[in-house]
Image: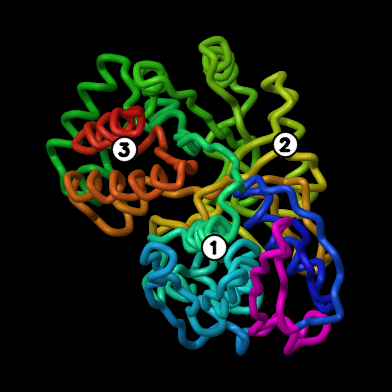
Amino acid sequence: MRVLVGEKYYKEKRYALSMLLNEFLGLNIVFESSDQNSYTKLLLDNNCVITIEDHFFHHYIGTTYLHKRNIPIEIDERRVEDLGNMAFLSLYGPSKVIFNDKSIVIKGDIIAATFFMLTRWEEAVIATRDRNGRFPANKSLAVRFNFLHRPIVNEYSEILWSALKSLDKTLSRKQRKFNFLLTHDVDLPRLWWSPKDFIKSIGGALVKRKNVKEALTLTQQYIAGKDPFNVFDWMMDTSEKYGFTSHFFFMSGGTSDKDNYYKISHNILKELMNDIMKRGHKIGFHPSFNAYNDRKQFAGELELLRKTSGQDITTGRHHFLRFEVPTTWQIWEDEHMEWDSTMSFHDKEGFRCGVCYPFPVFNIHTREQLKLIERPLTVMEGSFITYQHMKPKYMEQHIKNLIDIVKSYDGEFVFLWHNSAFRDKKYNDVYKNVLEYASIK
């Protein structure tokens, strides 16, 4: 298939089309430059044509599109009857698809919308940050227009595929299989390292939370030599029961009061990492609070973790889900990392990048596609427990609903559950039930 792309913003448009057609659908495509910037044409081998209108890039020069005024202020959505009544949510242009005998015109600019979601450029042009320096979910277009729970980039890919198949029934696409990526950020491997820590935890239960039952439970655990955060064997047992591999992301430094909860060189941590690797699970990197935009800090922590673990660490996620577009991705690229899984909002579950497939990222400043793969985080347990204060049964159902959505695309569901979150036993069944549900073929 030949793809004619306008010379204006050629790299940006080619990236979005590569994701939709090649990365996600697995179609063989050849790009050609065109002097027509108001549309893109897909030329099929049987002489049929799909035209995608440009309602965004042809209006701008250079990087002038990178401004908050260019974020959509309204969206358009309707069902496309000729494509099996598929939902079409358009960020730029009308959500219309026009059919003729040997041609189809997609009037909604799915190229610009795909680029918008995958690159997260809205986060680079909106200055608002929360108290931990994070881009707030409620400032995102997906939350403001209530489509965070929809992987709209997957929807665009399906719209394209349905349109292509309607014109050429001989086409075949990449075969995918649902994947459940189980991850654990190891912020606090132990609740207490000394009697002093135990006394602090009792004080927190009695004074801060006024919870006598919690204090008694902690005392019983301490006397029995059981740390409530040391549940790694149980976590791996549970992973193995349902056929999953756990990825444990460890910290190895930091410069803030939100770091340095443990020393990665401690014998307990070395033994834990060795046990994880012996059992066939994975070690990853959890860069500290300030490492998300500090390459030197990032590189130093990564080197220490690699040296201590004896592993060539190439995967992980940032502490507190801190992220700066596109700086963080570029740091990971420069340090030869394989994949990151930070992209989710700390207080909202769903599809921050609008997709449930892993994808290579794009640097909006250098205008280059990187080798680094983003595996977007779908659910963090803290989003429900800490920030939404959701009861276990509702939390479980929300997660299962998202799993169903991801399964419908044969996508990848990325799940984060901290070892320290198992301290609240009432949520343990949620964890086990989710793993069991995800394991059902």
Q: Residue at x 81, y 55 (%)?
A: 30
Helix, strand or loop at mark 1: helix
Numbered tag placed on residue 201 in the rendering: 3
Give the mark nearest the N terminus, 1 or 3. Answer: 1
298 or 208, nearer to the observer? 298
Residue 172 occupies which quadrant of the picture?
A: top right
Q: Residues within 10 Å of mark 2 (few under 14, many from 20)?
A: many
The amino acid type of the residue labelled 3 equals Ser
Residue 430 versus residue 294 in the image, above or below: above
Residue 354 in sight: no
Which residue does the numbered mark 1 point to in the structure image? 163
Which residue does the numbered mark 2 point to in the structure image? 302
Marks 1 and 3 close (CB-CB < 8 Å): no
Q: CA distance from mark 1 to mark 3?
A: 60 Å
Residue 266 versus residue 25 in the image, above or below: above
Q: Which residues are magenta?
A: 38-67
114 or 210, nearer to the observer? 114
Q: Position of residue 404 (x, y in %)?
A: 33, 45
Q: Quadrant of the N terminus?
A: bottom right
Helix, strand or loop at mark 2: helix
Residue 45 in sight: yes
